[in-house]
Amino acid sequence: MADHPRAGQPAQPEDLVDVAHLVTSYYALTPDLDDPGQRVAFGTSGHRGSSLQTAFNEQHIVATTQAIVEYRREQGIAGPVFLGRDTHALSEPAWVSALEVLAAADVAVLVDAADRYTPTPAVSHAILRHNRGKADDDASRADGIVVTPSHNPPADGGFKYNPPHGGPAGSDATGWIADRANEILREGGGRADAVRRVPFERARQHAGTYEFLARYVEDLPAVLDLDAVRDAGVRIGADPLGGAAVDYWGAIAETHRLDLTVVNPLVDPTWRFMTLDRDGKIRMDCSSPWAMASLRERMAGGEGGRAPFDVATGNDADSDRHGIVTPDGGLMNPNHFLAVAIEHLFSRRSWGDDVAVGKTLVSSSVIDRVVAGLGRRLLEVPVGFKWFVPGLLDGSVGFGGEESAGASFLRTDGTVWTTDKDGILLALLASEITAVSGASPSAAYADIERRHGAPVYARVDAPADRDQKAKLARLSADDVSATELAGDPVTAVLTEAPGNGAALGGLKVTTENAWFAARPSGTEDVYKIYAESFRGEDHLRQVQDAARDLVGRALA
């Protein structure tokens, strides 16, 4: 895909969303359920869409919240719902709609005590704190809802459910909730008029409050060595990218007495201060060099050639992703930082020898080599952070990470911290690494490459219609007869994850020096090819070409 001509450049007035029109559309438009794009559909991170396309509107949220009310009743969950929201323009209207339904159903609700924004990891942390020591059938267990489309553009809204384990809901829960929500809408001709609600003033009075920020920030020394960061005088620049972490970074600096500057404290639902992403859209993707152009330039342009910070970080709108910028390496590739984080944590934490490292099947194989060098067990799972939840919860997985810059890890004592991605945690870990090692995470990764090889990694898309995508999701290893990939013998053909036996919803083919994975897109008529080679760019292109050919033959 060619870069947009203004990728990495500041947004202009014509790039900005009309917030008034966006919010009006949320209330005014009614979904047409004959259009699949206007139904409730939970992906790996909840229901997402724009009110302008009638994909995220009041009726969707009312119906989905009612479905969650019924789901938790079926599951015997009677504790409070922790309800949080990020800074997208549609998040507060959807938060209000959800609160009105929950209050009418007499569900106990806990909202932020300061009536501010709530990062996804703070909601996960709160759920786990409330449920600590409770049995799986204890009716007083809590769960949560986070109103966020994560790093999506400003016109989007998102709505995700976290059950009592604190992490992303599995497909059993999300499938039930989506089906019931669409049933409610279908019964009302696209409207959820039969769902009981109370006026917002009464709903707000019904809700209790919770100190999300204070309890999360004060608990950080249980999972990070912040004393080392402070004692080393690590200079940190934190950019919330206009997201839900905006209050958290200042509180972290003050509470733990760190040399930390909040680079951009602004919140603006148009995100007019962002630089455009690769495709020319405003997107709060802290792993994108185009979206992170301002912070990268700031790190490269210090006085006298010295960077203003030893480590600079970014988060997406709900703070479940991290971006790491160093003076010597710029914006780190997410796979590279995951490898550094794993080596640092498992070398310095006193976790049991049987505690595993979790990665998704499309994350870099340099992680496999680091894990092998540590003498640890690798748990390779399908795409989706939900697969790490059981291991993080019981302490059998010390670290779970995705190639899309999402990860979390255990407390120092080996117990669970969060079961959802925590971008604040990983950003602070970069400072711990700098403090303890005396070198940047980029320098640590260069050392990993010297010892384990230097992979090149990329993702490309290939066209596929709906039938082809469905067939790709159902492929078995027997459908692939190839014995060679880009000149190397095939060592494995996988349609199930080796870590837990779960279906990949696609295909992964490996050799000693390379691999590719192909998965159908959930939103476009394409399939995604992730590929990596330890033999350079030319070999990577050969792997990508071979992948298209191999998948094409399998689909034919």
Image (cartoon, helix red, strand yellow):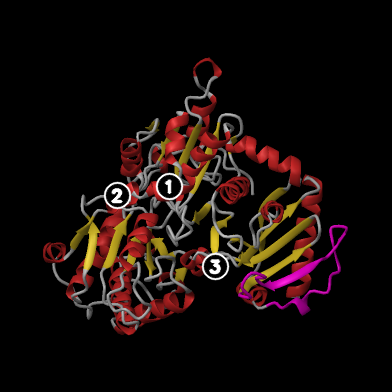
The local secondary structure at tag 3 comes to loop
- The amino acid marked with disc number 2 is Leu
At a point 64% along the width and 49% down the height, the residue shown is: 1
Mark 2: few/some/many CA within 10 Å (<14, 14-19, 20+): many
Q: Which badge, 2 or 3, is on the more N-terminal residue?
A: 2
Residue 61, image quadrant: bottom left
- The amino acid marked with disc number 3 is Gly
As rendered, which of 153 and 129 lies closer to the eye? 129
Which residue has dot 3 on it?
Answer: 522
At a point 81% along the width and 48% down the height, the residue shown is: 535
Q: How far is disc 2 from disc 3 in space, using C-alphas?
A: 34 Å
Indicate which disc residue 424 carries.
Answer: 1
Indicate which disc residue 213 carries.
Answer: 2
In magenta, the rendered stretch is 475-502
- The amino acid marked with disc number 1 is Ile
The answer to whether 209 is drawn above or below residue 444 in the figure is below
The local secondary structure at tag 2 comes to helix
As rendered, which of 283 and 172 lies closer to the eye? 172
Q: How far is disc 2 from disc 1 in space, using C-alphas?
A: 12 Å
Q: How far is disc 3 from disc 1 in space, using C-alphas?
A: 28 Å
As rendered, which of 15 and 497 lies closer to the eye? 497
Left/right placement of residue 161 relative to residue 371 reads: left
Residue at the farthest top position: 304
Quadrant containing the C terminus is: bottom right
Q: Tell me residue 232's x, y (percent).
A: 47, 30
Tell which tag, 2 or 3, sits nearer the viewer. 2
Counting the numbered discs, the total is: 3
Tell which tag, 3 or 1, sits nearer the viewer. 1
Residue 442, image quadrant: top right
Left/right placement of residue 88 relative to residue 339 reads: left
At a point 53% along the width and 68% down the height, the residue shown is: 387
Indicate which disc residue 174 carries.
Answer: none
